[in-house]
């Protein structure tokens, strides 16, 4: 397959590129204008194109040519950034997705087969839930600007699919982490604070609310799921990417503290507490497993070890 990947220069993108090339696919990768193209990717025969989601001409240029598959990863992925500027989240995630979908529909060669387009959303679209894993039959009830903008992205993709012949699949990954993730996200943020406290001999670390329970995946497992959906997912369907296992943020903190060797206590900081934290967000990925055979392979302890080791490299 010839596969276009938007957001290929992001955290998840580089793992997706590795999965695609390992599977023998030809890859066209999109990056933000002015971003540095990773040196390692040049040796893997990857074509790079600039992409600005807010610029219609840029989107048209980045998506030009016949593609067999598209993985739309490009997004404002930080919940904190979305809370600071909800309008930007909607512009990038919803309007940006609408532009990508429209460009793909308009740019197709006459008579060519429509590409499979995997649009990456988020498990956060479900909002608060009872303490059982959520499946895809649960309606979206977003409780944050980020999640709401992702619902907008889903609807933009579905609307385009209804009036064109693009084959759209929605992927809803739950929380994922691993080496290279920035400290806007909870696991690397904990690791960074714990290492700093350990180095300084401090006995406390500031945290937000540690009660919420999340379904943590390894980024490499998530990348595998996206590639499986390209080849085995059913167009028109929505798939959770999840482990089905809930881990509290307190447990995550304790595991990371043990890996860092920090003997510290977490101290709640009101500045770090979210007003709309979802108490429990764990997914059921049985539908994905049935369609593609995917299951998570990398244990959370290994993910956290790799994350902490990457922090020291």
Image: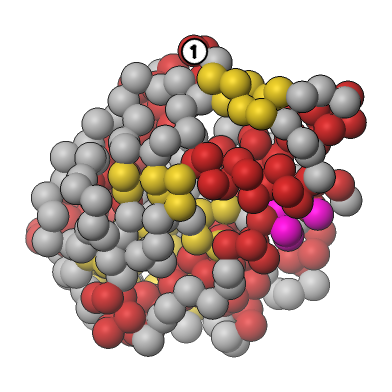
Work out whether residue 254 or residue 141 is closer to the camera in this orientation and state it: 254
**Is 138 in the magenta?**
no
Image point 35% across, 30% down: which residue?
277
In the picture provided, is 9 more to the left or to the right than 61? right
Task: Name which residue lies at 55% across and 15% down.
Answer: 269
Within-10-Å neighbours for mark 1: few <14, some 14–19, many 20+: few
Relative to 286, is 236 on the left or the right?
left
Q: Residue 165, position in %: x, y? A: 17, 69
Residue 262 lies, in percent from the top left, at 79, 38
Residue pointed to by mark 1: 270
Residue 53 visible at all:
no
Relative to 22, does residue 128 appear above or below in the rendering? above
Name the residue at the top extreme. 270
Asked whether residue 63 appears in the rendered view, the answer is yes
- Which residue lies at the image location 33% right of the left edge and 55% below the top edge? 282
In the rendered image, residue 139, in percent from the top left (x then y), is placed at 12, 50
Residue 272 drawn above or below residue 65: above
Residue 279 position within the rendered picture, expressed as x and y whole percent measured from the top left: 31, 38
SS state under label 1:
helix
The dominant secondary structure in magenta is helix
Q: Where does the magenta region start and end?
A: 305-309
At a point 40% along the width and 55% down the height, the residue shown is 246
- Picture quadrant where residue 69 is located: bottom left
């Amino acid at each position: 397959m010839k596969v276009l990947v938007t957001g290929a220069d992001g955290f998840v993108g580089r793992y997706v590129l590795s999965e695609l090339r390992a599977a023998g696919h030809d890859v066209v990768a999109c990056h933000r204008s002015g971003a540095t193209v990773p040196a390692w990717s040049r040796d893997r025969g990857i074509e790079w194109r600039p992409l600005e989601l807010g610029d219609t001409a840029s989107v048209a240029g980045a998506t030009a040519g016949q593609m067999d598959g598209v993985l739309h990863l490009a997004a404002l992925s930080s919940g904190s950034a979305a809370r600071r500027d909800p309008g930007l989240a909607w512009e990038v995630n919803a309007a940006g997705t609408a532009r990508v979908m429209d460009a793909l529909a308009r740019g197709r060669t006459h008579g060519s087969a429509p590409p499979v387009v995997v649009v990456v959303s988020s498990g956060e679209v479900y909002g608060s839930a009872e303490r059982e894993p959520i499946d895809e039959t649960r309606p979206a009830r977003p409780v944050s600007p980020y999640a709401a903008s992702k619902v907008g992205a889903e609807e933009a993709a579905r609307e385009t699919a209804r009036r064109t012949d693009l084959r759209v699949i929605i992927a809803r990954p739950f929380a994922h982490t691993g080496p290279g993730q920035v400290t806007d996200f909870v696991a690397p943020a904990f690791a960074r604070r714990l290492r700093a406290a350990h180095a300084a001999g401090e006995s406390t670390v500031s945290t937000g609310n540690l009660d919420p329970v999340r379904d943590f995946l390894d980024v490499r497992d998530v990348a595998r799921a996206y590639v499986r959906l390209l080849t085995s997912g059913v167009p028109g369907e929505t798939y959770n990417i999840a482990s089905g296992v809930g881990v509290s943020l307190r447990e995550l903190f304790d595991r990371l503290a043990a890996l860092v060797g920090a003997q510290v206590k977490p101290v709640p900081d009101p500045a770090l507490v979210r007003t709309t934290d979802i108490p429990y967000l764990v997914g059921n990925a049985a539908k994905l497993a049935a369609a593609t055979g995917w299951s998570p392979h990398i244990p959370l302890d290994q993910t956290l070890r790799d994350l902490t080791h990457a922090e020291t490299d």
